[in-house]
Amino acid sequence: MDLKDIKAIIDLMKKNSITEFELEEKDSKLRLKRGLTGGSQAVQADDSIPLLLNPVPAIQPATISNAVATTTTSVVSVVPTGEIDIKSPMIGTFYRSPSPEAGSYADVGTEVNSESVVCIIEAMKVMNEIKSEVKGIITQVLVENGKPVEFGQPLFRVRPL
């Protein structure tokens, strides 16, 4: 990862009001935090692991712009009503469908199982399919299409079957 990529991540953090970002690759780890210190914004990197020991070649945006790169497992938690929240496993932009013209992966009333894709979260130009991880019926969609989401933010509420 080069300095240009790190600056792009910092700009993304500022634009989306993200306070913490962490990226782990085979031989490196990047951790950035933003916070108020003395009235100014501070961004810092984790000193415990050298960032540029083994630079990773930059991926050209054209290569990944329309690709769904990974299927990511979501974070699931039970809410007091007995329903289950499907939470975001990462920060990024929430999309309910694979393209603007396509129908939503999951709407209120949709029955899902542990392998059902419920949305996409775009992170650093990579489209990540998010699976339900639970069997049930969607009772609420908690995020508006195209809006930024944080790690652990509830996306859907599911009544288990």
Image (cartoon, rainbow, N blue to C red):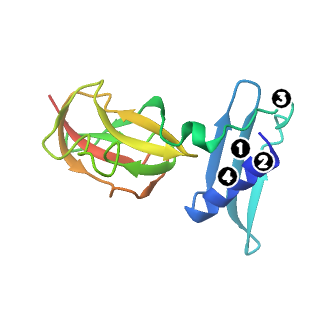
The alpha-carbon separation of the residues under discs 2 and 3 comes to 16 Å
Residue topped by disc 3: 54
The relative height of residue 156 versus residue 130 in the rendered view (above or below) is below
Q: What's under tag 4, amino acid-wise?
A: Ile
Q: Could you tell me which residue is drawn at 69 percent across and 54 percent down? A: 8
Q: Residues within 10 Å of mark 2 (few under 14, many from 20)?
A: some
**Residue 45 disc label:** 2
Asked which secondary structure carries label 1, the reply is: strand
Mark 3 and mark 4 residues within 8 Å of each other at the beta carbon? no
Residue topped by disc 1: 31
Front disc: 2 or 4: 4
Residue topped by disc 4: 9
Mark 1 and mark 2 residues within 8 Å of each other at the beta carbon? yes
The alpha-carbon separation of the residues under discs 1 and 2 comes to 5 Å
Query: Is 148 situated left or right of 132 in this image?
Result: right
Q: Residues within 10 Å of mark 4 (few under 14, many from 20)?
A: some
Q: Could you tell me which residue is drawn at 32 percent across and 58 percent down? A: 144
| Position in image of residue 153 (x %, y %) | 42, 49
Residue 158 vs residue 37, the one in the foreground: 158
The quadrant of the rendering that contains the N terminus is top right
Residue 20 vs residue 24, the one in the foreground: 24
The quadrant of the rendering that contains the C terminus is top left
The alpha-carbon separation of the residues under discs 3 and 4 comes to 19 Å
